[in-house]
Amino acid sequence: MGTSERPLDDSIEADLVVKISEAKSRLSELIQRAEAGERVVISRGATAVVELRPIASVRSPIGVYQEIAGSVDMDALHDALDKGWSQQELDDFEGDLDAELRAR
């Protein structure tokens, strides 16, 4: 039977449903489609068993800060961290970063 453009039942939301045997030969394509935002489900017979979806990227706080503020002087950052920040400096930094992220 192969590919279906509709879900197996009303409880499964998918753009594409593929049986395991077909998914084996089309895995690269199915991964690309999932990365592009399509909901891809792999079934065993008439039973949906797996949904392919991209893993959300995990970004470090420094990476997020660099995106917002540009490049970071790592030596200055290490010096500041070694010196230690006051609670007020930490609160100010975290508040500024949170405000920037909410504004995105």
Image (cartoon, rainbow, N blue to C red):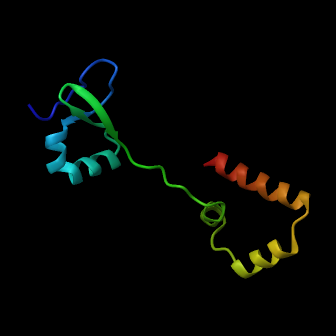
Q: Residue at x 14, y 35 (%)?
A: 3
Residue at the top extreme, as displayed = 10
The quarter holding residue 69 reads: bottom right
The quarter holding residue 43 reads: top left
Residue 54 seen in the current view: yes
Describe residue 24's horizontal placement relative to residue 97 as left or right.
Answer: left
Q: Position of residue 74 (x, y in %)?
A: 69, 78
Q: Position of residue 17 (x, y in %)?
A: 22, 33
Q: Residue at x 66, y 46 (%)?
A: 102
The residue lying toward the viewer, choosing from 96 and 49, is 49
The quarter holding residue 5 reads: top left
Residue at the left extreme, as displayed = 1
Residue 39 seen in the current view: no
Residue at the bottom extreme, as displayed = 75
74 w.r.t. 69: above or below: below
Q: Position of residue 11 (x, y in %)?
A: 34, 20
Q: Position of residue 56 (x, y in %)?
A: 48, 49
Q: Residue at x 76, y 77 (%)?
A: 78
The residue lying toward the viewer, choosing from 30 and 50, is 50
Q: Residue at x 90, y 58 (%)?
A: 87
Describe residue 50's horizontal placement relative to residue 6 as left or right.
Answer: right
Count the marks: how many?
0
Quadrant in which the N terminus appears? top left
Describe residue 81's horizontal placement relative to residue 55 as left or right.
Answer: right
74 w.r.t. 68: above or below: below
The residue lying toward the viewer, choosing from 52 and 99, is 52
